[in-house]
């Protein structure tokens, strides 16, 4: 699989993404043809090599005439521009999805309906070019999967059409919901709403560089001058092996040792941790210093849930310290399929790799509820659900 990894060393903006794509080998004439297809008056695309603190990078510039730059657009008009351009489905659909997410963020910020959102900066012609050409560039480079590093947002304030706003700007904050952020001492707005919308829409994972054989790398320069670091976005392109074709994500492992808490206290802590978003929580008996028996509480969680879950561990146990480890997890792709068994509807978890089903098992909670209702054993319900799944799959091979 061909991977495109965006390394947000100093944030992300639309022009930085385009610069990285061109620097990594995307042909500029092809992107210029895409711009021409949009039929935006007075708009053109150019690129030049620049120096970013001793590193050669590509700066892409969208030249916009005075009238297009002043024009504010609503989402339906932007969608119409994209539809009329005759772009490939992957490019058009990706661009419309990105603008749709921008509209949702703006609607939430301004407490209005999506169809009534009045775009300002993100409705300008240069933003349309950035978003459409980002999708076109990924297609031209034949990138099948996008992965992104944690994203730094910057510090301080930014001035926009609505006045002075804190960094990250309100719309950027919403777009980055659920995405791991990176600390950075560089002042100013490092990640723009357009950059955030592109990366959070197209990337399916955020974390460290995955195992890959690097084929190309590109550096996209921003327009601001970095004070503490070079202002560029790096794109690394490569192929993954069969191992990486399985799903991977970044997780954190939290550990705490306790020797002065009852079993009830630790069990309750596990329940609360799972309720508050932990992917898993379990206890292992251990022998601590001076031969004292104790318990090791281990929690697996998403990076953005670390602070909240550590607060639960401190509140619900007697531990004085928590160890934190960043991990990369490899997992099978999984989906829930609903089947109609003799005991009622049951969800069945199906795990697969490379399109081949490897594991099938009914959801415990569904089976337990059905067993109580029917006054039958849990095993009877599980076997009935598996049989129903096999019959459904045989009747419709597309569900396998």
Image: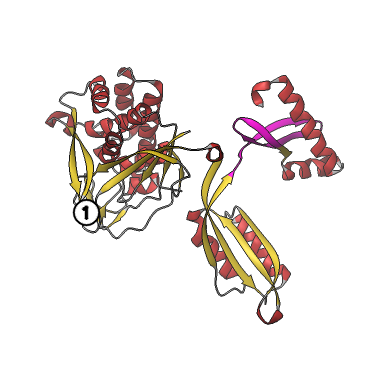
Q: Where residue 306 appears, x then y in whole percent?
A: 51, 59
**Label 1: few (<14), some (14–19) or many (≥20) C-alpha neighbours in 10 Å:** some
User: Which one is in front, 53 or 127?
Assistant: 53
Residue 72: in magenta span: no
Find residue 193 and report its horizontal and vertical position in percent: 31, 43
Is residue 27 in view from this perspective?
Answer: yes
Q: Quadrant of residue 360?
A: top right
> Compared with residue 168, is residue 367 higher up or lower down, i.e. above or below?
above
The answer to whether residue 238 is left or right of residue 300 is left
- In this view, which residue lies farthest toward the bottom? 290
Which region is colored magenta? 331-359
Query: Is 229 situated above or below 25?
Result: below
- Residue 127, picture quadrant: top left
Report the front residue among 213 and 266: 213
- Up-down relation of residue 86 to residue 155 (above or below): above
Residue located farthest toward the left when viewing the structure as drawn = 66
The majority secondary structure of the magenta stretch comes to strand
Check disc 1 and report the residue beneath it: 226
**Which corner quadrant holds the C terminus?**
top right
Is residue 197 or residue 45 the one in the foreground? 45
- x%, y% of residue 60? 21, 36
**Residue for point 27% across, 27% down:** 27
Residue 107 visible from this viewpoint:
no
Q: Residue at x 32, y 35 (%)?
A: 117
Q: Is residue 352 magenta?
A: yes
Q: Residue at x 16, y 31 (%)?
A: 64
Colour logic: secondary structure
> In this view, which residue lies farthest toward the right?
376
């Amino acid at each position: 699989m061909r991977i495109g990894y965006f390394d947000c060393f100093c944030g992300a903006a639309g022009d930085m993404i385009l610069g990285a794509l061109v620097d990594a080998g995307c042909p500029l004439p092809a992107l210029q043809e895409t711009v021409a297809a949009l039929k935006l008056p007075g708009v053109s695309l150019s690129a030049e090599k620049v120096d970013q603190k001793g590193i050669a990078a590509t700066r892409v510039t969208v030249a916009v005439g005075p009238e297009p730059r002043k024009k504010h657009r609503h989402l339906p008009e932007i969608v119409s521009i994209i539809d009329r351009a005759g772009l490939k489905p992957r490019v058009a659909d990706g661009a419309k999805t990105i603008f749709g997410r921008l509209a949702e963020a703006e609607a939430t910020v301004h407490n209005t309906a999506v169809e009534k959102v009045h775009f300002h900066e993100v409705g300008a012609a240069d933003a349309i070019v950035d978003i459409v050409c980002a999708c076109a560039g990924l297609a031209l480079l034949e990138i099948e999967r996008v992965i992104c590093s944690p994203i730094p947002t910057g510090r301080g304030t930014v001035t926009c059409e609505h006045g002075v706003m804190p960094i990250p700007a309100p719309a950027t904050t919403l777009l980055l919901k659920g995405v791991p952020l990176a600390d950075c001492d560089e002042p100013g707005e490092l990640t723009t709403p357009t950059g955030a919308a592109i990366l959070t829409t197209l990337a399916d994972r955020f974390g460290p560089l995955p195992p890959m054989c690097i084929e190309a790398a590109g550096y996209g320069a921003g327009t601001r001058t970095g004070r503490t670091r070079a202002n560029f976005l790096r794109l690394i392109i490569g192929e993954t092996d069969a191992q990486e074709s399985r799903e991977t994500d970044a997780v954190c492992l939290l550990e705490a040792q306790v020797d002065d808490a009852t079993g009830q206290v630790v069990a309750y802590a596990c329940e609360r941790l799972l309720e508050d978003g932990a992917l898993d929580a379990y206890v292992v008996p251990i022998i601590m210093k001076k031969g004292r028996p104790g318990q090791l509480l281990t929690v697996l969680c998403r990076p953005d849930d670390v602070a909240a879950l550590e607060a639960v561990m401190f509140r619900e146990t007697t531990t004085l310290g928590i160890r934190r480890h960043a991990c990369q997890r490899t997992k099978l792709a999984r989906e829930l399929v609903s089947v109609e068994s003799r005991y009622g509807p049951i969800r069945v978890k199906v795990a697969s790799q490379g399109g081949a089903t490897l594991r099938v098992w009914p959801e415990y909670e569904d089976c337990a509820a059905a067993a109580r209702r029917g006054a039958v054993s849990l095993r009877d319900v599980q076997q009935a659900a598996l049989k129903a799944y096999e019959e459904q799959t045989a009747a419709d091979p597309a569900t396998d």
